[in-house]
Amino acid sequence: TYSITHYLRAQCPEEWEEEDTASTVDWHPDTKACDGSGPMTNCLKNNEGSIGYIDAAHGHENGLTEIRVRNGDGRYLTTVESGVAGVQQAATDLSAAPPTADGDFSDVAFYNMPGTNTWPISLVSYVYIRKDLSHMTDVRATSLVKAFATALFDPAYIGLCDRYGLLPVPEDLKKLSLAGLDMVDAGDAPEWKFEKDTMVGEGAGDYVISKKRRSFGLYEADRLADDVGPLAQEVRELKLQLAELRSVQGLSVNGAGGKAVRAALGATAVVAAAMGYLL
């Protein structure tokens, strides 16, 4: 709600009041209250013709039809049409960000940013880490925290999250974040390593996280997810085409009979998150 209301304020400042940009707002009494992604999904599926807001990944995962919204350049597009580059483009302007990762990010937002394909409601996930980890009694855990946080910027790992709509942050944001991780003091803790390719002997040692250590069930689940992905995308595109046809038909009936006809446009997925920003 915070994100969609700030986007509406940026797009329609004369119609959307400043006091209505918040995590909770007083919606019109004719609207249905659906708190959370799951309940919102059910509301949209159970009320034909309804329009709501939900994060893009959740909407696509549940087969909801996405409608186009206007970006900062006045172009109407979906998250699919915007693509990875369009979502990331929104977070390239760091003029409002502090020079270091331990600064104040309260004024940093990526709503309605310029660019032909820029997605207008891109969000960044934050992970907060203490710079001093001496309070942790197990020293191995201190370096593991840093290893985990660093992996969020490695395409080999964060790249696995794209199926859930979580994308790597742009390069400048990545550099700022990794510089912030350098501020974290893990003391004399052992260094954790990641085995991406075979590390003969060493790969089976202590403090090694290996992608080779996995069960057959996880392997099979990944394989099936890769097979289903393209099919799910085709279904979403067909639903969008169907929604557009219904919209055209609705306008034709409205013009002929003078009666207001609401086109059944399905659900809108208007929020895309970029994962991997750390302090």
Image (cartoon, rainbow, N blue to C red):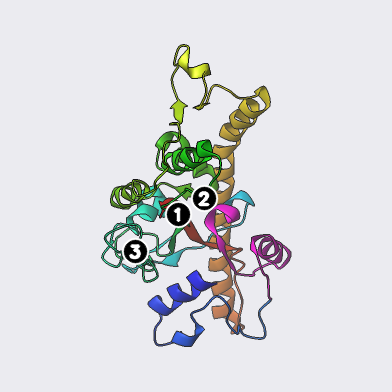
Q: Is residue 158 left or right of residue 54?
A: left
Q: Residue furthest right?
A: 46
Describe the element under mark 3 as helix, strand or loop. loop
Q: Is residue 42 magenta?
A: yes
Residue 135's disc number: 2
Reply above or below: 122 against 257: above
Residue 130: numbered disc: 1
Q: Element type at marker 2?
A: loop
Residue 117 lies in quadrant: bottom left
> Is 47 inside the magenta-drawn segment?
yes
Residue 54: give x, y in percent of width and height: 57, 63
Between 278 and 124, the one nearer to me in the picture: 278
CA gap, disc 2 and disc 1? 10 Å
Q: Of circles 2 and 3, which is in front?
A: 2
Q: Earlier in the sequence, mark 2 or mark 1?
A: 1
Relative to the observer, which residue lies in front, 119 or 132?
132
Q: Position of residue 128 (x, y in %)?
A: 47, 56
Highlighted range, magenta? 33-59
Task: Please tell me which of labels 2 and 3 falls first in the chain.
Answer: 3
Question: From this viewpoint, is residue 17 visible?
Answer: no
Label 3 crowding class (10 Å Cα cut-off): few <14, some 14-19, many 20+?
A: few
Mark 3 highlights which residue? 103
Q: Quadrant of the N terminus?
A: bottom right
**Distance of mark 1 from mark 3, alpha carbons?**
13 Å
Task: Select label 1 or label 3 by which is in front.
Answer: 1
Residue 205, percent from left and from top: 51, 19
Q: Are marks 2 and 1 in contact (CB under 8 Å)?
A: yes
